[in-house]
Structures are given as structure tokens and as C-alpha cells.
Amino acid sequence: MDAMGSFEAVVYAFSQQVAELREATLLRVDDATRRLHEQDVEAIEATVRALERKLQAIKSYVQRESEAIPQVEAVVAACQLQQQHLQHIAGHLPTYLPSLRSPELASVKENNRSAPNAAAAVAPDGAAAPKKRAPAPRRYITAAELASASSYMRGRLTADRINAAIDEMAVLAEANVAMVAAARRNRAVGPDKKQAMWLLVNIANHAQLKGRNWVLESDMKNGTAVRLDKTGKSLLMLLRHLGRLQEVRVPADGATHLVYLMLPSAEQWA
């Protein structure tokens, strides 16, 4: 009975060994399978290394960008400061420079023939050209000046509209100066000869107008940027308030003529 139990134990142990050998056999792979797994592992390893290189490149890029942040902040600060300066300049710069003309005055030469006619009267053929006089002052207003005026006075007027009017009045004033100069030298010719002589005798010799640039109210009847309507009168009143014009009343031919004196600088009213 004991011998039988020992035999069964040996058989059981042998069976266990066989089962373990079978399991070990199942874990073994052939060379082809091993090579296939090696290729997969190499491919995975190559991918991981490529990712590591990419990650390193990203880290380097982030480092460079981080180091550049102070420089970018300095540039942004400089741009903001420059913007403030430009805004300040834009707020105080006139829309039109003295050597330029407003787009609103594109037709001034067509609507106001007095300037070319006066130029022709000053220098007829064969006559010596007179000494040039300084151009009429063009003291353009700024947006801040316009804003400083009361709302009822500025109404819907804009700085561009007012500066265009200053340009137009300067053209008319220069035409009057040219005609008076021609009449004074007895060189006035053409259709403006009578007007030139009248200006010399009745207007130009007025004490407040001598050697100055001025415009008659009647000169603006056919104006483009400034007319003798309600808006034009408001504009003239605003220019007087801002010290660009001075109103002078000149008696002549039994009537009082309204003359606007263009001020080259801030002056007190007479």
C-alpha cells in the first residue's frame, strides 16, 4: 500500500515536470519571430529618440524666446512712447502747412480771379518785377484751440473747415496786396485797374491797414471755404475770438466798409 502511494507520488511529480516543460516550450519563439520583435523594438526606440530630439529642440526654442521677452517688452514700451509723441504732435499740428492748400481750395483759383489778374497788373510786359512781399499769415488752428471755444461759437465747424477758410482768405489778401502795389507804381492794368486804384486810395492808406494783409468783406461774396452766410459769419467770429483776425471798419465813399485784418501773431484788438 505504501509502495503504491510512493509510485503515485512519483507519477504526479513526473506529470508536473512535463506540464512545466510544456509551458516553457510555449514561451520559446523561433528565430523569425525573434527578429520581427527586434525590428519592432528598434523602430520604437528610433521613434522615442526622434521625440527626444524634437523635445530638446522645443526646449531650446522656448529658452530663446524667453530670453527675448525683455527685448520685446522694451520695444513695445518704446513704441507706446513713440505713439504718445505722435498723438501729441498730431493734436497740435495744423492740417495744412503754409506752403500747401486745402483740398477745399482746389477751385479757389477758378472762383477768385483777382489773384492772377493782380499778378498780371503788377508786372506788365517790359516792366521790372517789384520786390516780393511776405505772404499773408496762415496761422492755422489746432483741435485743442477749437475745443477751447464755447460750443455755441464753434457749432458744427471743424478745424479742417476753418483752416481751409484761412487759406482762402490768405489768397484774397495776397491778391489785394498785389493790386495795391500795382496801383502804387502806376502799373495797374486790365480789368482790375479801377479796383486797384480804389483800394489804394480808400482802403490801403488806413492807419490800421498800412503794410498789413487784409480782406474786404465783399471779397468773400463768391468764396468757396468762407462765405457771407450764417456759417461763414460764425466762422469769422470764431477766427476773431481765436486771435487770427481783427475787424476794422473803414469809411469810404460815404459808406463804412468792413475789413478783416489777418494777424501774424497774437495781438490786442485795436
Image: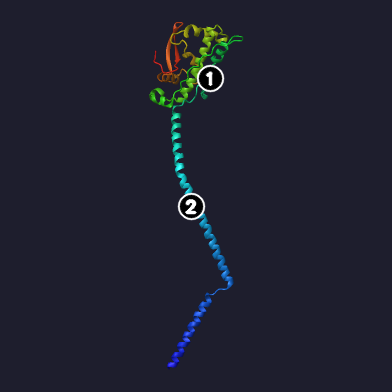
> Mark 1 to mark 2: distance in Å?
67 Å
The x, y position of residue 139, in whole percent, is: 46, 21
Of tags 1 and 2, which is closer to the observer? Answer: 2
| Display coloring | rainbow
Total marks in image: 2
Q: Relative to 154, is 132 above or below?
A: above
Residue name at image x 58 percent, y 69 percent: 35
The x, y position of residue 134, in whole percent, is: 50, 15
Q: Amino acid at mark 2?
A: Lys
Q: Residue furthest bottom?
A: 1
- 115 or 85: nearer the viewer: 85
Look at the numbered disc 2 and give the secondary structure of its residue: helix
- Label 2 crowd bin: few (<14), some (14–19), many (20+), radius 10 Å: few
Quadrant in the picture for the C terminus: top left
Residue name at image x 56 percent, y 70 percent: 34
**Pointer 1 and pointer 2: residues touching (CB < 8 Å)?**
no
Q: Quadrant of residue 127?
A: top right
Q: Which residue is mark 1?
A: 108
Q: Relative to 95, is 267 above or below?
A: above
The x, y position of residue 151, in whole percent, is: 38, 25
Q: Amino acid at mark 1?
A: Val
Q: Earlier in the sequence, mark 1 or mark 2?
A: 2
Residue name at image x 48 percent, y 87 percent: 11
- 114 or 86: nearer the viewer: 86
- 102 or 266: nearer the viewer: 266
Q: Relative to 59, is 41 above or below?
A: below
Look at the numbered disc 1 and give the secondary structure of its residue: helix
Q: Which residue is mark 2?
A: 59
The label on residue 29 is none
- 19 or 112: nearer the viewer: 19
Q: Relative to 79, is 95 above or below?
A: above
